[in-house]
Image (cartoon, helix red, strand yellow):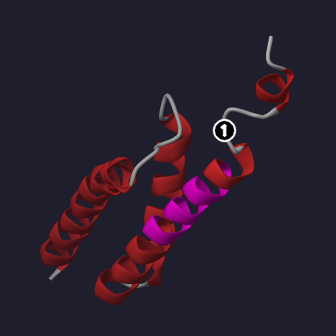
Amino acid sequence: MNQVAFDRPSRNFNSDCSDLTTMAERELSAFFGAVTELFGSEQADLSAEDWLHELVETDRVPASTTEWRLITAKVSTRLASRVHASSLVTVANI
């Protein structure tokens, strides 16, 4: 067995983990900022909690920007439902 190949890790785990963390931070930050701007801080807080919950529920850690965006898309549908329901209650109270 080639000892050099055996001692060398096949992947740089720390680099991969750092890249995934950076992708997650960017995606959540962009989503949080957009929701805050469009719907306010209360909805942004709820949506961030939903986003993190969705991440925990995934079978594996997303490995691409596209996979991170799928989490955001799923959470966006929850936000839309919540905002729509909230607007219906407001209209009903008028």
| Residues shaded magenta | 17-27
Q: As rendered, which of 12 and 4 lies closer to the eye?
A: 4
In the figure, residue 76 lies in which quadrant?
bottom left
Residue at image coords 35%, 77%: 35
Query: Would you say 52 lies left or right of 77 here?
Result: right
Membership of 21 in magenta stretch:
yes
Three-letter code, disc 1: Arg
Query: Would you say 66 lies left or right of 29 here?
Result: left
Residue at image coords 71%, 43%: 13
Number of on-image labels? 1
Magenta segment, prevailing SS (helix, strand or loop): helix
Quadrant in which the N terminus is drawn:
top right
Kindly give the residue lying farthest to the top in the view shown: 1
Residue at image coords 43%, 64%: 47
Q: Secondary structure at mark 1?
A: loop
Quadrant in which the C terminus is drawn:
bottom left
Q: Position of residue 37 (x, y in %)?
A: 35, 89
Residue at image coords 52%, 60%: 24
Which residue corresponds to mark 1? 11
Q: Is residue 43 visible?
A: no
Q: Is residue 59 above or below residue 40?
A: above
